[in-house]
Amino acid sequence: MGVLGLIHAGLESGITHCRGTDDLFNSVVAGLGTGALYTAATGPRSAAIAGAIGGIAVAAVVEGKQALKRYVPI
């Protein structure tokens, strides 16, 4: 999990720096890249599948966090 977190954080920081904005798109693309890089040694098909799963998972987590902030007063 630490390796995945490090890859994701590095990709997200790089994308944020290049685009100059911090939004949902950066997180999703970093999730796609993380999944693809982590499983790249097993072949392009599994890397594409893992990238899609990573992107979907990150999008769900970020949207869930925003919904939680909106509806749960903390």
Image (cartoon, grey):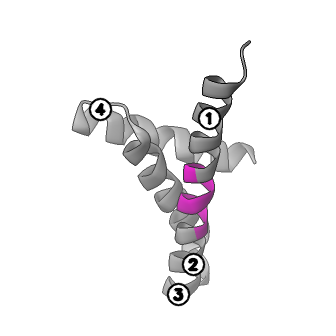
Q: CA distance from mark 1 to mark 3?
A: 33 Å
Percent x, y for residue 36? 52, 68
Q: Is residue 44 magenta?
A: no
Is mark 1 in CB contact (under 8 Å) with mark 3? no
Q: Residue at x 57, y 61 (%)?
A: 56
Between label 1 and label 2, give the one nearer the viewer: 1
Q: Residue at x 54, y 74 (%)?
A: 40
Magenta extent: 53-59
Q: Earlier in the sequence, mark 3 or mark 4?
A: 4
Percent x, y for residue 63? 57, 43
User: SS at mark 4?
Assistant: helix
Position of residue 28 in the picture relative to residue 23 (left or right): right
- Mark 4 packing: few (<14 Cα in 10 Å), some, or many (20+)? few
Is mark 2 in CB contact (under 8 Å) with mark 3? yes
Is mark 3 in CB contact (under 8 Å) with mark 4? no
Q: Earlier in the sequence, mark 1 or mark 3?
A: 3
User: SS at mark 3?
Assistant: helix
Task: Report the disc number at residue 49.
Answer: 2
Callout 3 amino acid: Arg
- Mark 2 packing: few (<14 Cα in 10 Å), some, or many (20+)? some
Callout 2 amino acid: Ile
Task: Report the disc number at residue 67.
Answer: 1
Q: State the residue position of label 4.
A: 17
Q: CA distance from mark 1 to mark 4?
A: 26 Å
Give residue 35's quadrant in the image: bottom right
